[in-house]
Image (cartoon, rainbow, N blue to C red):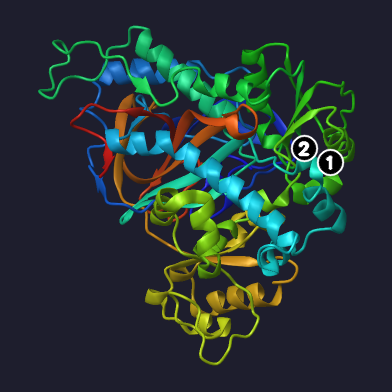
Amino acid sequence: MHVCATTSTTKLLSSRFSKTIFRQRRNGASRFLSTAGGWRSRCRKLNLRYHVTVNLNTADAPLSGQTAAEAARSIRDALPVGGLFAGLEWRISPTPFPLGENLAKEIESLGRVLLQFYRAVNLLYRKSAEGEQPDWVARWLDLGKPADLIALQRSPAFKNDVPRVIRPDILLTETGLSITELDSVPGGIGLTAWLNQTYSKISEGGVPRRPNQDGDSQSSPLRKIELLGAADGMLRGFESIFGDAKQVHIIVSEEAATYRPEMNWLCEQLGSRFTVHDSQFSEFVDGDAVYRFFELFDLANVPNSKKIFELAAEKRVRLTPPPKPVFEEKMLFALLWNRNLHDFWRQELGEGFLARLKKLIPCTWVVDPAPLPPQAAIPELNLTDWQQLKALSQRERDLILKVSGFSEHAWGARGVFLGSDLSHEDWAKAVDDAIQHFEQSPRVLQRYHKPALVEAQWFDFEKNVVVPMKGRVRLCPYYFVAGEGDAARPQLGGVLATVNPADKKIIHGMSDAILAPCTKPSQTSGVSAQ
């Protein structure tokens, strides 16, 4: 769940306690900082792989110093009194992160593909459990889960339910776009809503826009930015997923307390129909809706979860995301790449969607230590035993090893291992752990595609200057699914760009990162996919 780090999966910020946010000047830069009892980074990746052209001039001609200062200060001053995160600071860009026209269109149309993928996953699991698809599918997906949660996932009450918020993690890599993960309980909804709203107001509020290509800011016409999702796309999108529910309760666990401030701000924008509660709240009324902002591995620490699930099963409240741990597993991408399931995916996704997903999602495997026949080998890797993974050279280890799901280690950097960045001893230990703990907590292996360099900029309030920064970017689009049954449709609410300095291999919301909304640029700038 959560705003993320990406080279795999790191829960961007997750702390037990959140307090008030204050501004701090540090290393010559003014950043937003919130105190907290601790935080963890979670990361998620989304891999897209058609030809991508990365124009290093990802921003239009830079703003003049005076204009950039005005824009940056307006953004800084718009931060809510209660803050947006506990334990997060970031660099402020005076402008949104521009995407090329083709890349923007790719992202705008991706939601329907991912929704169909979720529907197909849901069907695959159910058919596997019923014996109409290979039984190893359900067996893999049920590993490490308690029996009562498996029974809940298979309950007829939730038969066709899929998450109503879909958030992929997308890297702009040297070989194209790469979708590394899907998050069905994501953080960052309030943050991205605030960014879209704030940058839109600056665009509309008279702050001069970028100068023209000749650098003449005086003769440049004022130009309204076109944010993906628009100013209120995140707000309207989130609101739409609850239908006509009389009251919407957002239940935030202690494990996800970092995100409580952003959800408080979100509810303030949406009105009294929306409220935020902790895991002790129990005053649900028939006809209400509940947004589950807690992970299923953490149910022991969420006392009201049992009541929520019972009411949802009885159709007395509307619950999203549903209590289905299958949607919190990274091995879904391994199932997509499994040749034994090709006919199923082709039938349920169609040739076009299947081909598109395989261009976007890197090869992924489940590290299942079951022995192979003597003549068999693991596809693409050409290994006959997972033990052989340890013997690969560092150059051959452009691979990510990570916990698939249903574990606190699935959301922390300690559960993510980049083979080419580790010593032989550390890599061998990670592989051994994956093999030994398969039955309790399966791991997945995924091809690693290095993020490409892009150019961004942030404003240094101490020196009162715009600072250019070469970095690597992760894009997180938020799709909201409104409507019922086959009539349900995803709508893009907004896109969060996280740009880390070029020397960082895992992309996440660190203090040196730029967080900004995304916009369609002019025809002469941006990152374009062709």
Residue at left 74%, top 44%? 159
Q: Name which residue lies at 71% across and 65% down.
A: 441
Residue closer to the observer: 296 or 63: 296
In the rendered image, the residue lying farthest to the bottom is 374
Left or right: 262 in relation to 222: right
Q: Nearer the viewer, residue 199 or 347?
A: 347
Query: Which of the two labelled residues, at mark 1 and mark 2, occupies the earlier sequence position?
Result: 2
| Residue highlighted by disc 1 | 302
In the figure, is residue 256 to the left or right of 57? Answer: right
Q: Secondary structure at mark 2?
A: loop
* Quarter of the figure that contains the C terminus: top left
Q: Is residue 357 left or right of residue 244?
A: left
Q: Taking the image as drawn, is residue 91 in sight?
A: no
Going by the numbered disc 2, the residue's amino acid type is Ser
Horizontal relation, residue 453 to residue 20: left or right: left
Res 249 quadrant in image: top right
Q: Amino acid at mark 1?
A: Val
Q: Residue at x 42, y 12 (%)?
A: 201
Q: Mark 2 — residue?
A: 253
For marks 1 and 2, give the CA distance.
6 Å
Relative vertical location of residue 459 with respect to residue 359 in this rendering, above or below? above
Secondary structure under the numbered disc 1 in the rendered image? loop
> Farthest top residue?
206
The N terminus - image quarter: top right
Instruction: Residue 387: give x, y in percent of width and height.
Output: 57, 84
> Could you tell me if the residues under marks 1 and 2 are in contact, i.e. CB atoms within 8 Å?
yes
Q: Nearer the viewer, residue 402 or 483?
A: 483
